[in-house]
Amino acid sequence: MVAARPHPLRRPRPIAIVDAEMAPMLGPDGAPLAARGWYDTESIAQDGGVLYVGIERVHQIVRFDYEKDGLLARGYPIDLPRAVRSLPSNKGLEALVFIPSDTLWPAPSLPSRNAGSTGRATSRLS
């Protein structure tokens, strides 16, 4: 689960959770992402044991080597095109998908002339 709120399980209450572990996501310095002001995580994509998490408020994607470090994995920012970094506040990356061709596709929440039937624009990060 990627949670935008510090306590995502308060409401609505889940019916059941089995074999779950929770911990704050850590930044490159080992401190929680929230301590850097990096909050509003909205998206996640997986490539093998690596997780990519999109942070909407700061227009950032961080890469976690979850397979190697588990919940202690540190998130390292990846390079993004200038257009992603300049999205309006709270109108950033809403979704990510990793396609096996080593391509990460983010989807910002801005409508675009090139948007498909979902009304969301997509960009390719290679």
Image (cartoon, rainbow, N blue to C red):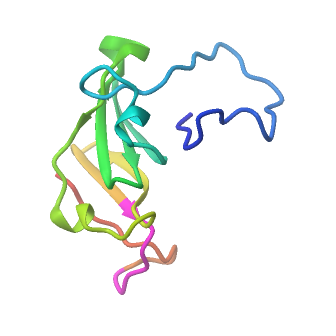
Residue 111: in magenta span: yes
Residue 15 as seen in the image, left or right of residue 8: right
Q: Residue at x 21, y 55 (%)?
A: 125
Image position, residue 55 (x, y; %): 39, 48
Image position, residue 106 (x, y; %): 34, 57
Identify whether 74 is placed above or below 84: above
Image position, residue 61 (x, y; %): 30, 45
Q: Residue at x 36, y 70 (%)?
A: 88
Residue 29 as seen in the image, left or right of residue 17: left
Q: Quadrant of residue 85?
A: bottom left
Q: Residue at x 45, y 63 (%)?
A: 90
Identify whether 90 is placed above or below 74: below
Residue 9 as seen in the image, left or right of residue 24: right
Front-most of 36 and 24?
Answer: 36
Q: Quadrant of residue 81?
A: bottom left
Q: Quadrant of the N terminus?
A: top right
Image position, residue 79 (x, y; %): 16, 48
Q: Which residues are magenta?
A: 107-114
Identify whether 126 is placed above or below 14: below
Front-most of 73 and 58?
Answer: 58
